[in-house]
Amino acid sequence: TIYLLSDLALTIGKGDYSVHIVVGVDHAGRIYVLHAWRDRCSGDDTAEMHLALCEQWQPVESLIEDDNASRMYVITLADRARQRQIRLPWKTMPIAGQQKEIRAAPLRSLFQQMRVFLVRAPWNRWLTTQLMMFPVATGEGVDDGVDALGLIGRRLLQLGKPAAPAT
């Protein structure tokens, strides 16, 4: 089952990154990070990449945190998806005042259980650096990948164990 995970910064050229991560989840609840993208770009460019990834990967859900920036972004994104007839199965994930470490705890548990795997790709360097340095890294753009990937850990807690494939 494919999911698209997004953490939005919507700044151009500085600060945090906007990040989109594509993961696959198998019947045993193992997470496979299939693609990762990050850029310090406009909301328009972020939305275009989001739609391109939806077209390419056909995610069952596109997870985004429920914050003010995301609420505005989703309106623009949904409008563009309708215009271009692109399936956009977005789902907002509540933040509810939780700190980053608390939101990332389900992801940490998945790593401890050795249930997260990354395909080899050029983006491995920045993503693994962020994962290994979290939560002690400080500065701009040091945990955006963790924020995005953490969404799948939180979502899987809500869904429970995936169904086994039909035989």
Image (cartoon, rainbow, N blue to C red):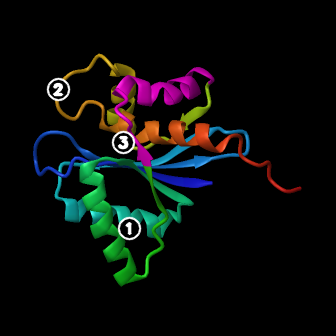
Q: Specify the segment rendered in magenta.
A: 93-113
**Mark toward the viewer: 2 or 3:** 2
Quadrant position of the C terminus in the picture: bottom right
Q: Is residue 32 left or right of residue 78?
A: right
Q: Earlier in the sequence, mark 2 or mark 1?
A: 1
Q: Picture coordinates of residue 107 (x, y %)?
A: 50, 30
Quadrant location of residue 124? Answer: top left
- Residue 12 visible in this rendered orientation of the protein: yes
Q: Locate residue 50 relative to residue 93 in the image: left or right.
A: left
Q: Which residue is mark 2?
A: 139
Q: Which residue is depicted at the point 64% across and 44% down? A: 159
Q: Position of residue 161 (x, y in %)?
A: 71, 40
> Tag 3 or tag 2, which sits nearer the N-term?
3
Q: Is residue 144 left or right of residue 117?
A: left
Query: What crowding class fits label 2: few (fewer than 14 Cα within 10 Å), some (14-19), or many (20 or more)?
Result: few
- Whichever of callouts 3 and 1 sits on the residue coming sooner in the sequence is 1
Residue at image coords 37%, 67%: 51
The local secondary structure at tag 1 comes to helix
Per the image, the residue denoted by label 1 is: 52
Q: Amino acid at mark 3?
A: Trp
Q: How packed is label 3: few (under 14 Cα within 10 Å), some, or many (20 or more)?
A: some
